[in-house]
Amino acid sequence: MAAIEFRNVIKRFDNGKVTVIPDLSLEIKDKEFIVLVGPSGCGKSTTLRMIAGLEDITEGELYIDNKRVNNVAPKDRDIAMVFQSYALYPHMNVYKNMAFALKLRKVPKKEIDKKVRWAASILDIEPYLDRKPRALSGGQRQRVALGRAMVRNPKVFLLDEPLSNLDAKLRTEMRSQITMLHKRLQTTFVYVTHDQTEAMTMADRIAVMDKGVIRQFDTPQKLYAEPADMFVAGFIGSPRMNFIECEIKRRNDYLTAEFAGNSLRIPSAKTKALEAYENRTVILGIRPEDISAYSGGMNMQESCVITANADIAEMTGGEVNVYFTLENSRCIARIRTERKITSGDKIKLLLDCNMAHFFDKETTKAIGRI
Amino acid sequence: MKTRRKAFNAVIYAVLILLAAVFLAPVFIVIMNSFKGNFYISEEPFTLPKDEKYVGIENFIKGFTQSDFLQAFLNSAVITVFSVAGIVLLTAMAAWYIVRIKNRFTKMLYYLFTFSMIVPFQMVMYTMTYFAFELDLNSIPGIVFIYLGFGAGLSVFMFSGFIKSIPAEIEEAAVIDGCDPIRTFFMIVFPILRPTAITVAILNAMWVWNDYLLPYLVLGSGEKRTLPVAVQMALTGGYGNKDMGALMAMLVLAILPIIIFYLFCQKYIIKGVVAGAVKG
């Protein structure tokens, strides 16, 4: 149970030639479930490995439980880590794998046995305690890896893409199991993934990283509803947010965003921030789920109807993903419709103005948050 | 088409069986003659030891008691056991260091080890013997030390190949669990290396046990002589009639331990060679 704090941490590799983390400051509260998310090579795993002590910190300070740990060995940080490849010891059976850390700490055998069996019962791996890792399925191995961390009762749980080697069904199952484990153990969890769905479903707060920089650190709801920039807006949400270049124009007492012969009335709540952009080009962002099929009779003050050609229509069950092109931008709409849409169809789509986001074309930052 | 293929396979099998027979014949003849009387060994070397030709284990008793066989056997055993143990342990450590610590020094070290594999022994034989005598390495502990050097190249090469296939995350997990480098090596890395370690041990044991030239040059043919040197001396040394029966028995006794060792561990050779080839 511990808070973690990065204070202006810099991480360089190759004798200082390559900077992976330019300047990281991050505060993780005690018992929080934090997810570090971002594309491959964004520095999320390096950040996690710095907490673990597997990577040195080039500059800056790292605190765990208010104690500076820059020069503290991994074994003395009271952390446990679950790796992507599980990293189980192949020559030991499940019991010995889970007991290993406790044995090194010279914990009495009785207590080791109690703790291993407690973790095994929670994770439902009791029948496999005598098996070697190679005789287990991917999901079972992952549970053993979690169990090995649990028996230590650490201050901090570090998880490095622990579900990426599992199939989709098992991943969903393990996701809920890890969330339940966090609630049960009441410990600080730091979880690394490149999968935004995992991040959104599990985290108390998410740090979206790109090129070693935290672009936004907030709750999943806030990241989705109020993305700080185009990177976050594009990364969070599936399918990704549509970005369309548009020009801000004044029409009598309100502003509009004009693109490809369409005019979208900007809601009054967003007018103030956009006034400075009058007659300038900005980026309109709208999520696929905020576009629907137009069936007439809507309040046109808050919506905008566009006509587009469906390039591709993908049936996903209750919804259809329609791909279309607007102002040279490839867009996607996730719509519920009873009408069968096929590629090449001309369709009328309704954009929900209240859900539109606007970004500065130069800085890519969200207008109103700059 | 099928008949032609069958005929072709039959020819291939026949050639392979013939080759196997040619290679096995000398071993078989030695074993066969080790149970025959001296007269029949020279008169009928290719017949089976039966009826009056069969002398039981008489040759083995003679071979064992003659020409300090036991002393030579012990010398060979001590040298082989210590050399192999040293090679396996130290080269596994060296390979682990070379693979995990990536810098110019370890890269150079790796090339140096692999280079030593291609240098023929005859090329360094003279200088090595000279230095062995200069440094007082012409003793049993001394030759163990020399074998460490000559065996290191191939062993480091084999261990490195396998260690590269072990995810570093396993060692990182051990570090987080509380292992220092020594514990990580002995409790995690070395047990995982077991199949390769056994392969390395078998290959080196066969080489050290059967080696003739190095022990002959360094230890000579005195009381420190090894088994191959003793056998060679029994074959060519002295005047007059040789006890061929005892000699054949000595040859059988000399190759027996290494064959037993090989048969006992051979399944690990296969495991060790293929280990790491595919992700399990």
Image (tube, coloured by chain):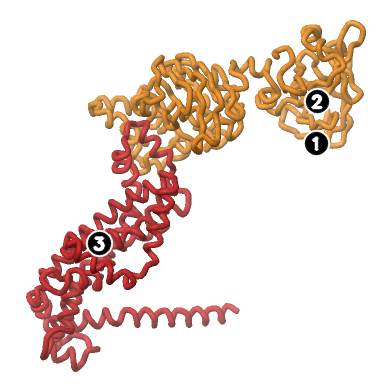
Chain colours: A orange, B red
Which quadrant of the structure image shows residue A246? top right
Amino acid tagged 2: Ile
- Tags 2 and 3 touching, CB below 8 Å: no
Task: Please give left or right for residue B112 compared with residue B71 in the image.
Answer: right
Name the chain under label 1: A
| Residue located at (42% from left, 53% from top) | B108
How crowded pointer 3 is (Cα within 10 Å; few <14, some 14-19, many 20+) is rated as some
Q: Is residue B50 above or below residue A367?
A: below
Which of pointers 1 and 3 indicates the residue nearer the eye? 3
Could you say which disc has been placed on residue B146 in the image? Answer: 3
Between discs 1 and 2, the one toward the N terminus: 2
Task: Please give left or right for residue A75 compared with residue B63 in the image.
Answer: right
Amino acid tagged 1: Ile
| Residue located at (31% from left, 79% from top) | B24
How far is the residue under mark 2 from the one under mark 3? 74 Å
Indicate the secondary structure of the residue bearing disc 2.
strand
Instruction: Report whether residue A120 is seen.
Output: no
Could you say which disc has been placed on residue A312 in the image? Answer: 1
Q: Which residue is mark 2?
A: A244
How far is the residue under mark 1 from the one under mark 3? 73 Å
How far from the left and from the top, in percent, is residue B69?
11, 73
| Residue located at (15% from left, 81% from top) | B234
Amino acid tagged 3: Ile
| Residue located at (52% from left, 18% from top) | A26
- Tags 1 and 3 touching, CB below 8 Å: no
How far from the left and from the top, in percent, is residue A355?
75, 15
How far from the left and from the top, in percent, is residue A155?
39, 20
